[in-house]
Image (cartoon, coloured by chain):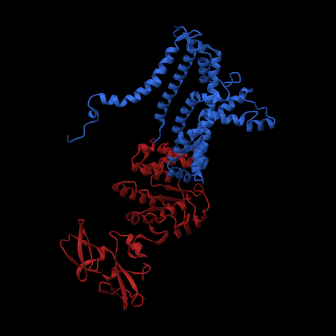
Chain colours: A blue, B red
Amino acid sequence: MSRPAPASHLFRGTALPWLLLLPQLVITALFFFWPAGQAVWQSLLREDAFGLRSEFVGLENFADVLADPTWLAAFGRTLLFSGSVASLALVSALFLAVQADRNIRGASVFKTLLIWPYAVAPAVAAVLWLFMFHPNIGIFGRMLNAAGIAWDYKLNGDQAMLLVIVASAWKQVSYNFIFFLAGLQSIPKSVLEAAAIDGASPRYRFWTVVFPLLSPTAFFLLVVNLVYAFFDTFGVIHALTQGGPGKATETLIYRVYTDGVVNLNLGSSAAQSVILMVLVVGLTFMQFRYVERRVHY
Amino acid sequence: MATLKLTDIKKQFGTTQVLHGVDLNVAEGEMIVIVGASGCGKSTLLRIVAGLEFATSGQVDIGGQDVTGLDPAERDVAMVFQNYALYPHMSVFQNMAYGLKIRRMAPEDIRKRVAQAAALLGIEALLERRPRELSGGQRQRVAMGRAIVREPKLFLFDEPLSNLDAKLRVQMRAEIKRLQRRLGVTSLFVTHDQVEAMTLGDRLVVMHQGHAAQVATPMEIWSRPADTYVASFIGSPAMNFLPGTMEGGAVRLDLGLKLHLPATPALADGHKVTLGIRPEHLCPGAGGITMNLELLEPLGSETVAHGRLPDGTELTARLPGEVTTEGPLSLLLPSEHLHLFDAATGKRIGA
């Protein structure tokens, strides 16, 4: 053999490629396709209260869910919650990244501290915020009450929503921060210097040069943050408010849990999770389409 | 168009002194090339003029106005960067219009100015393209265009040709010179390439370890270098240096040969000196020095001969035509082409 074999002939036959792909395929099948398939199948069934019998009901579960005013209310609440979490987490992370990108003393310590929250489990993060904002034992909760503000997130639904939003956003800031910082550092310094010589003020420079160059990163993060707010905030909500008071902090994912695990309405719960899955698949698809078109360099 | 005056510019990064007090006066419309090896402080000096760095001490005046403490935006200068630094998310038109927009120029005027500059540089067809869709030479032109449309007081060039291939570099060099003549804008051009420096500059600043070793016209620097560094840096191949001692108004080379100089320098006998002669000024002939040939580089119209003197000193000679001899080569040192430097300080002696 004088020349290297072309790529298509690198492996003789198909056995070896399949073997090499097998671990990944097994994991994907076992932990995604199987449960997802189960959910889809479950969403087409209706079970009796004792789980003894189930019957095939077609899309009836979906029709019920989509016609349920409390589900629609939870949907609206989720949009508000996710939108707020994503914007709060993105804006604060961008602000912090811009600060950290400057040549300031102690920048590396600053960066390390900012990355820490990412290593904190959602439930632990929630407990942390609980200890700060509990009306009786939380430092800030007591301070607010002492200052004459009636702070009790266990009674006031708006306050409860605010608290879960802030706690969820706080957890996501680190992740966004790393991406924004990497994005900022990949902008050539000379481009910013050229803008400065062209007469742009730091603020104008940020909005006309830095931000447009960061926009692919920002869009990617927006999608990731929305998905995070949709799914990964269960722990925070569960530990802080359990969806209460009333249903003030019951998002779609929390409702899937309540209906399925607490109320044992498996068909409805499965239908709801299938709807969520479709939403996320849509978001991800949009991201791939959009980001690929908007990459500048 | 404006004058530029630098007064005793010093710059320190931490404990490292990068510039040791540079003075420079640039006349209106003049093209000054700052040349030196990497790390000599030439780019730092340019960035201080641009306002991207601030001098530790000293003063920068542009057009008679003290701008030492001003931000780049307030200095009305334009700069062409080594990597062009085009805005990657903007079209060529937007790149060139950016600075004008900031100055709140009317859209029709912007369009007119950009069109003019584009025509001057031959990039009218590229105005809608993004930088990543351009070749290196085209990006270079756009970067020039972005500087030109602003009609600034000062052009600053930071090694703008070093990312281009050899052929394009020669072409762009000529174009920059033509353009600068035509627009008559005072310019500072930083380069490490001595050919670029010689061909572009009305005057050169040869930088060495944070000092301006010599500020003069290219020909003057070539014919009367201020010290051994400048002498060896400008001119290719580099000047030959031979150690010697003063003896009765003439130079006694360590080799033994005694050479008379056109003008007798006022130096005491026994003063150590360095004698310099450019390779192209050595001519074959008996009665001079003898070089043992080591390498011949035929270049067609001439041949560069590398070799050693009997005492081991390296010597290079540029001889006309083809050289076929092997072994020792006898060379004459014409006295009108000799440069005399102080051996201790390296400074030029006499006229």
Query: Front-most of B225 and B301?
Result: B225
Query: Front-most of A164 and A138?
Result: A138
What is the residue that sits farthest to the bottom in this orientation? B248
Instruction: Classify residue A21 as left or right of residue B40.
Output: left
Look at the picture and state if B343 lies above or below B103. Answer: below
Look at the picture and state if B17 lies above or below B112. Answer: below
Q: Position of residue B57 (x, y in %)?
A: 59, 67
Query: Front-most of B321 and A289?
Result: A289
Q: Where on the picture, by quarter, is residue A61? A: top right
Q: Where on the picture, by quarter, is residue B15? A: bottom right
Instruction: Classify residue A84 as left or right of residue B248.
Output: right
Q: Position of residue B181 (x, y in %)?
A: 45, 61
Query: In percent of the image, x 75 and y 30: which residue is there?
Result: A152
Query: Front-most of B114 and B286?
Result: B286
Q: Is residue B310 visible?
A: yes
Q: Where on the picture, by quarter, is residue B315? A: bottom left
Query: In percent of the image, x 62 and y 35: which residue is there?
Result: A124
Look at the picture and state if B294 lies above or below A34. Answer: below
Query: In percent of the image, x 57 and y 53: which residue is there?
Result: A103
Image quarter (top left, top right, bottom left or bottom right) of the C terminus of chain B: bottom left
Q: Is residue A88 visible?
A: no
Q: How many marks?
A: 0
Instruction: Classify residue A215 as left or right of residue A151.
Output: left
Q: Position of residue B127 (x, y in %)?
A: 45, 43
Q: Position of residue A211 (x, y in %)?
A: 56, 42
